[in-house]
Amino acid sequence: SYELTQPPSVSVSPGQTASITCSGDELGDYFVSWYQQKPGQSPILVLYEDIKRPSGIPERFSGSNSGNTATLTISGTQAMDEADYYCQTWDTSTAWDVFGTGTRVTVL
Amino acid sequence: QLQLQESGPGLVKPSETLSLTCTVSHASISRSNDNYYWAWIRQPPGKGLEWIGSVYYSGKTYNNPSLKSRVTISVDTSKNQFSLKMFSVTASDTAVYFCASERSDTAQGLVSRYFDLWGRGTLVSVSS
């Protein structure tokens, strides 16, 4: 089965840049989406098709995807960005949705 | 704005069947002009997200193979709802269950599928 691996945690100072990676075999050949989940809440979509932001998502959220790694970048991180982040892709070969293992972003 | 709301028992006994319904509001579940699937996703306490399966308004389904033999996902267009049944549950099925709308597109020759809206989730505990 296809697997997406994320670092368990990332720490960042307010105003700095946080980078969250998502690794999978030839992941660059698939579209990746990213979700933000705060404690006790349901996830919200922050990026789709690697780089696109849904309406209402701040410009400080950006993404890239190449080779075996997709990256979610939060520029000028704010305290409100402290949350768990999950990547997700659709494995075309098996017709499965797959979520990454999740990364907790802490704003120190 | 489309809304989704999960409903169903919060407690299920081991070996019994978990049944949940998601009611879609402010949009038709049969939105044939848009490529939307309707999905179930779960999250065990303190753990990550796990996709359970997705259903199209026509009834076509995609399921997580690790759960496939125990799961049925169906759609009722007359009620604007879709449902999840999970059979022979055990304590490991204890989780928050989310329903979500899943957009399906093709761009640059690639399939794009992502969950653009989620319900609030409902906690289902499996215990005697």
Image: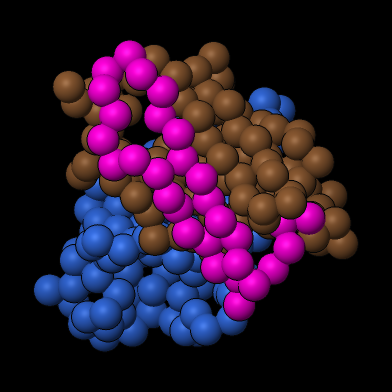
Chain colours: A blue, B brown
**Extreme front residue here?**
B78
x, y (%) of residue A83? 27, 65
Q: Is residue B108 visible?
A: no
Quadrant in the picture for residue B94: top left
x, y (%) of residue A9? 22, 53
B13 or B64, which lies in front?
B13
Quadrant in the picture for residue A51: bottom right
* Above or below, B93 relative to B107: above
Relative to B122, is B27 on the left or the right? right
- Is residue A26 inside the magenta stretch? no
Quadrant in the picture for residue B55: top right
x, y (%) of residue A99? 47, 42
A6 or A85, which lies in front?
A85
A95 or B98, which lies in front?
B98
Q: Is residue B21 visible?
A: yes
Q: Quarter of the image containing the N terminus of chain B? A: bottom right
Residue in view at x 79 percent, y 60 percent: B31
* Above or below, A37 relative to B51: below
Residue in view at x 25 percent, y 28 percent: B126
x, y (%) of residue B33? 87, 62
* Above or below, A35 relative to A2: below
Which segment did they paint magenta? B1-30
Residue in view at x 61 percent, y 45 percent: B82
Residue in view at x 51 percent, y 45 percent: B21
Q: How many marks?
A: 0
Relative to A13, is A42 on the left or the right? right
Q: Quarter of the image containing the C terminus of chain B? A: top left
- Is residue B19 inside the magenta stretch? yes
